[in-house]
Amino acid sequence: MYIQGFDGSWLDHPFWRTRFVIEKEKDLIRVRESAVDAVLIDDTLGVAPDQPPAPRKAADWQPPARPAAAVWRPQPVVAAPAQNFGSSYGRAARVFGKSKRAVSAMYADVRLGKAIKAEKLVPMVDEITSSIDENPRAFISIAQLKTRHEYTYLHSIAVCALMINLARELRFSEAAVRDAGMAGLLHDIGKALMPLEILDKPGELSEEEFDVIKTHPLRGHELLAKSSGVSHNALEVCLRHHERFDGQGYPDGLEGDRLSLFARMSALCDVYDAVTSERAYKRPWTPTETVARMREWTGHFDPEMFEIFVRSVGIYPVGALVRLKSGRAAVVIGENPEDPTRPPLYSMPDENNPEARRLEWDGDEIVGMESSESLSVENWEAQRTKLIRRVRS
Ligand SMILES: [Fe+2]
Ligand SMILES: [Fe+2]
């Protein structure tokens, strides 16, 4: 079947191209499950080896079954092959492997009732920091690839890395960067005190089980309070990483400025890693998809911190409007797996340059996201769809 086009936003279907032959059943299923309203089919161009070609006639609109809820379906992020990262990827993998052994031993000790000596973890946090400084994408990409059995302690390493990366973006002092990393590493230590049958349960938790799991910030805080070398910020992150900016989180429902800077950072890093990881009950979301969805969860995160976080992980959703250091506004029109901080961009059309054009990376950099309202772009959705279609065809 030859697809001539999709009726609906480019966000509504998972294909890079809009004109192509569907040869595999799985692709047909992907079309059916997508949120597009209709598909334009040219039945003179399809591949049907066992049948004579149909006489040419006007293309038909065939509405596919619509899924219950239309969801954001971005292009899949292509994992960058190891060689693209070169030796920094190899070094990051070694640091990650070492950290994995140390953290799993720490969790095992806590399960046996031993206290934590956080000062012993400082060299590990410093090594992770060096790896992030060398190539943040390398370490963060490795930390995303965790199996569900190793989830809890690998998640701690991932949150440690994301906290360090965010602390760097916030221009923290060296001591505060280390503190942020340590806080990330220890934030879920209370999970070591949770029953394993709940922690490792395949499938979603019952309400009662979830109530038990919700005690992990408090249990962790109690443990860290009697451990050595744990800073005030690490204690705070352990207790507050499930609080929400709108006061709907737990354990205390603290809101806004009552949550410390470190607590607000940790809420973002924690959720980002949780949803980009594979869990027993869900597929991992791509980083791009994650950022897009997290942006929609109004009230959950500190909005200013959210934008800084997005910048720190360097993930810009296709179709996003961004502001460049040079002052120009641009549209993200694809992904760059080798360097997600520098995706392919098109300039925004304006009075002087009515035609959108491809921008070259000439020393400029993305400094933040833009809203279409702030640029007063008329009918932005339609313009964006048109532009992306033009670029991709
Ligand atoms: Fe947690
Ligand atoms: Fe967590």
Image (cartoon, rainbow, N blue to C red):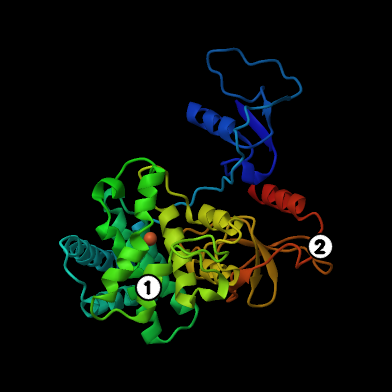
Q: Position of residue 14 (x, y in %)?
A: 56, 41
**Residue in view at x 32 percent, y 41 percent:** 202
Residue with the mark numbered 2: 354
The crowd level at tag 1 (other Cα within 10 Å; few <14, some 14-19, many 20+) is many
The mark nearer the N terminus, 2 or 1, is 1
**Residue in view at x 70 percent, y 72 percent:** 328
Front in this rendered view, residue 308 or 197? 197
Q: Do the numbered discs 2 and 1 sit on residues whose CB atoms are within 8 Å?
A: no
Label 2 – label 1 distance at C-alpha: 41 Å
**Residue in view at x 19 percent, y 71 percent:** 115
Residue with the mark numbered 1: 132
Q: Is residue 21 visible?
A: no
Front in this rendered view, residue 54 or 259? 259
Front in this rendered view, residue 209 or 331? 209
Q: Amino acid at mark 1?
A: Ile
Q: Using the image, determine if residue 116 lies above or below residue 336.
A: below
Eye-nearest disc, 2 or 1: 1
- The part of the image, by quadrant, that contains residue 360 is bottom right
